[in-house]
Image: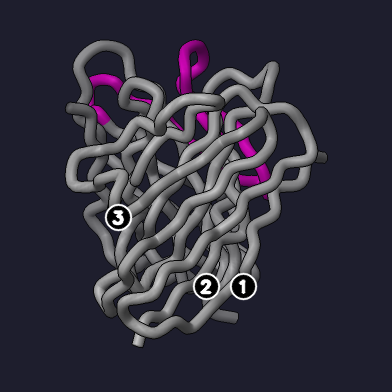
Amino acid sequence: AQSVAQPEDQVNVAEGNPLTVKCTYSVSGNPYLFWYVQYPNRGLQFLLKYITGDNLVKGSYGFEAEFNKSQTSFHLKKPSALVSDSALYFCAVRDGRKLVFGTGTRLLVSP
Amino acid sequence: SAVISQKPSRDICQRGTSLTIQCQVDSQVTMMFWYRQQPGQSLTLIATANQGSEATYESGFVIDKFPISRPNLTFSTLTVSNMSPEDSSIYLCSVVFRGGIDEQFFGPGTRLTVL
């Protein structure tokens, strides 16, 4: 079965600094990978996906993710964090027609 | 952009009762799903809602507990039956839009508390 792991429960970063939220995957075949964000009391919002092609994927709100096949990773990045980026971030992998989610990483951006 | 709505947005229910959650989309979709997010946890797929036929349930979820209907392309319901406090969760529907490829888009969720 396909799976993803998010090794960090929480990431703290100061506003203006670069941020990275880590995700590793375990799949058979080619991975279809996704990042979602969940703001308090709201549903999940799609950020970006990797299906094939360039290893650097650009998404919403200035986020990007780097697909690394040798390290089986798909880390989420942003060059300059904003306080409003504080939220819960989920990595996911497609398994058949469904999505399998990681445990989530809470990002706290301090002013 | 398309809108996915869920009703109710939240509810507090007594154990032993049932609650039906509605998911409505304003565009045609190819697939609809129901997920559960238990407090402080990640999302777990309950089932795929199939139009005009029985839903496809994931391991650990059964139709008697979570009956699902999808009478047309843009509407689905999930019922949480004979509720217990362990059913307290956020329930989310998600869709794949017609013309979309892989990404699922989620409704705002229904926050259920069972006393």
User: Which part of the image, by quadrant, shows the N terminus of chain B?
Assistant: top right
Report whether residue A16 is seen.
Answer: no
* Image x and y of residue B108, in percent: 61, 59
> Against B74, is B107 above or below?
below
* Foreground: disc 2 or disc 3: 3
Residue A107 appears in the figure: yes
Q: Where is residue B85 in the image (x, y as percent from the top left)?
A: 28, 79
Q: Which residue lies furthest to the bottom in this view?
A: B115
Please tell me which residue lies in front, B29 or A89.
B29
| Residue at mark 2: chain | A
The residue wearing badge 2 is A109
Q: Residue at x 46, y 25 (%)?
A: B53
Do the residues at discs 2 and 3 belong to one chain?
Answer: no
Image quadrant containing the C terminus of chain B? bottom left
Which of marks 2 and 1 precedes in the sequence? 1
| Residue position for label 1 | A83
Q: Is residue A61 magenta?
A: yes
Magenta-colored span: A48-72
Secondary structure, mark 3, is loop
Q: Is residue B12 on the magenta stretch? A: no
Could you tell me the amino acid type at mark 1?
Answer: Val
Mark pair 1, 3: CA separation? 41 Å
Q: Tell me the CA gap for discs 1 and 2.
A: 5 Å
Residue that label 3 marks: B65
Q: Do labels 1 and 2 share a chain?
A: yes
Q: Which chain carries label 1?
A: A
Q: How crowded is mark 2: few (under 14 residues within 10 Å), some or many (20 or more)?
A: many
